[in-house]
């Protein structure tokens, strides 16, 4: 099509789902009526190689790319329009920041922050048009964007505002941590129906849940920051760094997600055992599941040089797996392969892919990759399938999902049952024993009472030792034993096992998280903080890790830094009651009682009273402080001994604080592990009774 001589040069490319063809046609007609060249011709939507080449050429040549967003694009997670979107985003990365190119248009009630679109769309201006009816303001807007005078000099363009135009939500200032926050979750949580109180629960693997608004804010702020401050030449990730994206489940059965996700995670773990590779951890890689972000955006956010993606199609006992390794810096494909195998070959296939990726990255391996991949594993497809189901259940119902109410007896029992099924299918499956040990420990810590506690503790120890007996160099086995020792207050033994586990798998994010948190608790502050910061390199999009750094900084008495980290956590997960509670405590310890009160009053009916009991007392509101203590007593009875000691120590009632600490010692309260660094106990440290308790705990030197 030709332009009128006096009109702006350049064509507008309309990208739409087939169900939105009528809305796209009306939008096209109005733009063409204003003399603007538009690529839109339904007669050409016939597919084939020639048509495909023409579309790719049009996207390369167009001046503006206008994706139409609607309920139809929301519903279609696959479609040719999504390839068009990806091609356009890829092209946008080669453009100067000042040049406008992406102009998303919403034609129905689909909300910006919930739209299933590439992250790059969120960093630019959006327009809302009813069913494709182009308001005059939008036509004028497109004219301005096509004008050659629009981009001159070095000033970033901000299109003129209009009542018909609105922008995607972004924060007013760059977030200090686009990499989000949380690792050791120390939360007060009531377990419904169990009659138990899991206070100060250590959350090892928590995958935080973000609201759609928070996720949009994260994506928009991160994308905007990368566009504003980074150029293509500024992106210089470690050359042997890689992210493994969750392989797409192509089976047509949502219930098979556990298999494709689990296979992706096992492949990720296999690569993480190779010392020469820096592998982005699971939570950060899986953050993009269903987001349809382009690979360049993912690589920038994770700071990795390569991205592995693929798909899994499972039908009966057969598998078809495709895998593709891309260089995120150059955009070129490094390696790709398709595999058609019997389900019985899935374990060998995992090794084959890991070897192929390592070779493609030209990594010099220390030892045989296959041996490392299979260590602690199984050759039984039935055992492997059960293990993946167990891991999926544990992630959804164990501490990984604590903030969403996931820690529950039935859910953990389903995980234990699947781990047991895996062990029954292969009695030598060390990884399954290690996983079941952690689940048993969670039962003992939070979900059972009375004689059952000792029973589950014993089961946790037996499984951990069985895993080590089967695979002495399996890091996960030593982690399970360390977890048992920590819960049993055998602190020196626990630290030894944490050190052993980390030495075996220094790139394992879970181990870094556990080691770092525990090291701080026993007074190895710098080593713990170093591990927490290393974890952020491997797992930058996992809020748990950032939160854990904040809590560790608080235990290190670095309250200003802790407040900064926890404030970032609140910005990204504003309704997380644990974040509010610990932010309130950090303010309290830093002397800002008004901010402390405001934060803890948003910490919920279980978390809030504990910190408010201390804050209200410092504010002189002693009756209110007593009321908060009464609330806790109503929930926990005498089971909250260490927490009562915190409160009485801060109230200045030394005798009662020490009485409750001694009660905690008699009960072997696992949360006494915090005694050495707990700032609430500072008023007690010169007391002989307190010093006797600390000696009895036998903290490692």
Image: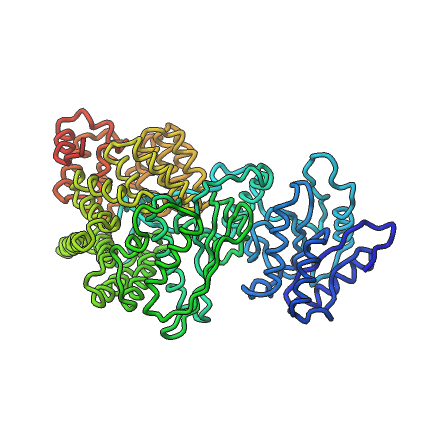
Residue 554 lies in quadrant: top left
* Rendered image quadrant of residue 57: bottom right
Q: Indicate the quadrant containing the C terminus: top left, top right, bottom left or bottom right.
A: top left
| Residue 334 location (% of width, % of height) | 50, 53
Q: Nearer the viewer, residue 430 or 448?
A: 430
Which one is nearer the viewer's eye here, 315 or 210? 315
Its colouring scheme is: rainbow
Residue occupying the point 56% across, 41% down: 226
User: What percent of the width, then of the height, locates residue 417?
Assistant: 24, 65
Residue 483, image x and y in percent? 22, 47
- Most extreme residue toward the top is 686
Spot occupied by residue 395 in the image (x, y as percentages of width and height): 34, 56
Is residue 168 found left or right of 141 in the rendered image? left
Residue 381 in sight from this viewpoint: yes
- At 46% from the left and 71% from the top, the residue drawn is 252
> In the rendered picture of this protein, how many numbered marks are placed on residues?
0
Asked whether 20 or 40 is in front, the reply is 40
Q: Is residue 635 visible?
A: no
Give the camera-side residue of 387 and 613.
387
Q: Is residue 157 above or below residue 467?
A: above
Q: Is residue 406 left or right of residue 658?
A: right
Toward the bottom, the furthest residue is 316
Residue in the image at 19% along x and 34% along y: 657
Figure quadrant of the N terminus: bottom right
Relative placement, left or right, of 543 versus 66 is left
Q: Residue at x 22, y 36 (%)?
A: 645
């Amino acid at each position: 099509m030709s332009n009128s001589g006096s009109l702006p040069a350049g064509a507008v490319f309309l990208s739409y789902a087939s169900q939105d063809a009528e809305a796209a046609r009306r939008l096209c007609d109005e733009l063409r009526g204003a003399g603007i060249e538009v690529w839109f011709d339904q007669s050409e939507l016939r597919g084939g190689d020639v048509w495909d080449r023409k579309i790719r050429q049009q996207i390369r040549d167009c001046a503006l790319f206008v994706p139409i967003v609607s309920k139809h694009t929301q519903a279609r997670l696959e479609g040719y329009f999504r390839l068009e979107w990806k091609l356009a985003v890829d092209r946008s990365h080669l453009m100067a920041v000042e040049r406008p190119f992406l102009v998303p248009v919403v034609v129905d009630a689909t909300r910006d922050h919930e739209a299933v679109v590439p992250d790059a769309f969120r960093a630019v201006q959006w327009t809302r048009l009813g069913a494709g009816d182009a308001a005059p303001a939008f036509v004028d807007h497109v004219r301005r964007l096509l004008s050659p005078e629009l981009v001159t000099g070095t000033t970033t363009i901000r299109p003129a505002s209009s009542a018909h135009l609105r922008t995607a939500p972004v924060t007013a200032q760059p977030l200090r941590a686009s990499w989000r926050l949380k690792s050791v979750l120390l939360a007060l949580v009531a377990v419904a129906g169990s009659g138990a109180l899991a206070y100060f629960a250590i959350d090892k693997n928590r995958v935080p849940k973000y609201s759609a608004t928070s996720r949009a804010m994260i994506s928009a702020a991160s994308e905007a920051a990368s566009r504003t401050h980074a150029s293509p030449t500024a992106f210089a990730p470690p050359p042997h760094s890689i992210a493994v994206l969750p392989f797409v489940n192509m089976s047509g059965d949502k219930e098979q997600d556990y298999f494709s996700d689990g296979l992706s995670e096992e492949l990720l773990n296999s690569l993480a055992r190779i010392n020469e590779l820096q592998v982005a951890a699971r939570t950060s890689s899986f953050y993009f599941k269903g987001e349809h972000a382009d690979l360049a955006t993912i690589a920038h956010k994770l700071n990795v040089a390569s991205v592995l993606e693929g798909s899994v199609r499972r039908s009966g006992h057969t598998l078809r797996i495709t895998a593709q390794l891309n260089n995120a810096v150059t955009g070129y494909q490094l390696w790709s392969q398709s595999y058609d195998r019997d389900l019985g070959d899935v374990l060998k296939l995992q090794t084959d892919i890991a070897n192929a990726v390592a070779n493609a990255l030209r990594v010099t391996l220390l030892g045989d990759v296959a041996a490392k991949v299979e260590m602690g594993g199984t050759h039984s497809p039935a055992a492997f399938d059960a293990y993946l189901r167990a891991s999926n259940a544990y992630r959804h119902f164990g501490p990984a999902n604590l903030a969403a109410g996931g820690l529950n007896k039935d859910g953990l029992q389903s995980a234990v049952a699947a781990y047991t099924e895996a062990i029954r299918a292969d009695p030598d499956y060390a990884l399954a024993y290690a996983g079941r040990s952690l689940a048993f420990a969670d039962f003992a810590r939070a979900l059972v009472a009375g004689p059952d506690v000792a029973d589950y503790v014993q089961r946790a120890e037996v499984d951990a030792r069985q895993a080590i007996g089967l695979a002495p160099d399996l890091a996960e086995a030593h982690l399970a034993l360390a977890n048992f020792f920590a819960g049993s207050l055998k602190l020196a033994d626990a630290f030894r096992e944490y050190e052993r586990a980390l030495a075996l798998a220094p790139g394992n994010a879970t181990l870094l998280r556990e080691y770092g948190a525990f090291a701080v608790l026993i007074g190895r502050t710098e080593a713990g903080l170093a591990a927490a910061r290393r974890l952020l390199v491997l797992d930058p999009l996992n809020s748990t890790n950032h939160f854990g750094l904040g809590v560790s900084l608080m235990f290190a008495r670095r309250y200003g830094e802790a407040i900064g980290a926890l404030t970032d956590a609140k910005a990204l997960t504003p309704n997380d009651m644990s974040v509010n509670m610990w932010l309130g405590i950090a303010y309290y310890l830093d002397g800002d009682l008004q901010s402390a009160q405001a934060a803890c009053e948003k910490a919920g009916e279980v978390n809030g009273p504990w910190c408010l009991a201390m804050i209200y007392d410092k504010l002189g509101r002693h009756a209110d402080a007593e009321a908060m203590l009464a609330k806790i007593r109503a929930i926990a009875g005498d089971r909250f001994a260490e927490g009562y000691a915190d409160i009485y120590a801060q109230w200045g009632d030394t005798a009662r604080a020490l009485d409750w600490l001694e009660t905690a010692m008699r009960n072997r309260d696992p949360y006494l592990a915090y005694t050495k660094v707990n700032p609430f106990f500072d008023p007690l440290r010169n007391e002989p009774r307190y010093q006797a308790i600390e000696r009895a705990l036998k903290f490692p030197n």
